[in-house]
Amino acid sequence: MVIGIVLVGLFLVLTVRGRHAPSRATVQFIQAWGTAGSGPGEFRQPFDIAVNREGLVYVTDAGNRRVQKFTADGKFVLEWGGDGLFRKPAGIAAAPDDSIYVTDYFLDRVFRFSPDGQLLGQWGDSGTDPGRFDSPAGVAVDRAGNVYVADEYNHRIQKFTADGKFLLMWGTQGKVNSVLSALNFFLPEDRNGHFYYPSRITAGPDDRIYVADSYNNRVQVFTLDGRFVTKWGGMGFWGGRFRVASAIAFDPDGHVHVADFYNNRIQVFRSDGAYLDQWENKGNLKPQLEGPTGLAMDNKSHIYLVDFHHNRMIKYHQTGGVR
């Protein structure tokens, strides 16, 4: 009984602290575009989003089996893949050389395209051997052009050269107990480098790899060669916790933004995992989110979100910064 009261007390204290973390950021709605459908600028189950150096926006439109390209203000430019190339395009990333990488969740493959959708290469097949995949979800590219894939159902990360030569992989399947996940501030767990359906990945400006370990409700951080650095999160609804971490991206100030799927919000952290801020569906965020699955930022502090259940993209502008 006493232990239960203590745990409840700790839970409430951390909830209050998380929800009232200091912040100076303001998130301003700019525009939204898209609706359910198969025409240009329409979507069926949009999955992920990327922004290249010029500010052009690329979206994996999974239900329509295509990629769509837009200007920064949402004007349709072109599409590709609806001719049978894809079965379920999932993750997408823009490389430093302006190549566009797309994973296909059902084909277990990675595609490389030019900025206007010309196929430059592809690799992968179904399986567990190096270079094979089981539902590749997220994809990221580091400053040297190396490609990282969140191999979701193999519960691991794989690293390749720009043209698909396998370099290394790390991770193993490991689910964090739900109780330990919710109470890890009090009962630490030691499953470093274990994944449970990792779905998104990004290369940070600090040359580290940040992984949304989605169904372990946390973020894990690694060196470029896969050595564990740190982790943060855990199951919950207060600041710093997740109910499926579903997307991850950096802003120009080096802060980490993480989409929190079932809590319908975006949370902001320092690169060491310190919680800073959140914006969510509770009066301070319009239009309202329902299942954010993709997140990208440009060098002007514009935030682009995939609003999965509403079949649309939403663009915000972050001003003021966060501490």
Image (cartoon, rainbow, N blue to C red):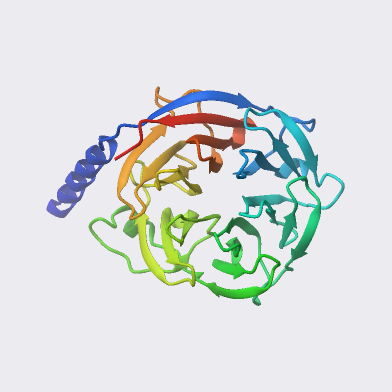
Q: Residue at x 33, y 55 (%)?
A: 272
**Residue 236 image offset from top left, x and y in percent:** 36, 46
Q: Residue at x 44, y 39 (%)?
A: 266
Relative to 204, 31 lies left or right: right
Locate residue 141: give its quadrant.
Answer: bottom right
Q: Residue at x 51, y 36 (%)?
A: 303
**Residue 61 image offset from top left, x and y in percent:** 71, 41
Relative to 5, 227 lies left or right: right
320 and 249: which one is in front?
A: 320
Q: Is residue 20 above or below residue 246?
A: above
Count of marks placed on residues: 0
**Residue farthest toward the right in the current orientation of the protein:** 83
Locate residue 109: give its quadrant.
Answer: bottom right
Relative to 160, 104 lies left or right: right
310 and 159: which one is in front?
A: 159
**Residue 145 image offset from top left, x and y in percent:** 60, 62
141 and 20: which one is in front?
A: 141
Residue 238 can be seen, yes or no: no
Q: Residue at x 45, y 45 (%)?
A: 258
Q: Is residue 314 above or below residue 239?
A: above
**Residue farthest toward the left in the current orientation of the protein:** 2
**Residue 23 image offset from top left, x and y in percent:** 29, 34
For the C terminus, the image quarter is top left
Locate residue 319: give its quadrant.
Answer: top left
149 and 10: which one is in front?
A: 149
Residue 240 can be seen, yes or no: yes
Relative to 44, 167 lies left or right: left
Q: Is residue 289 above or below residue 252?
A: above
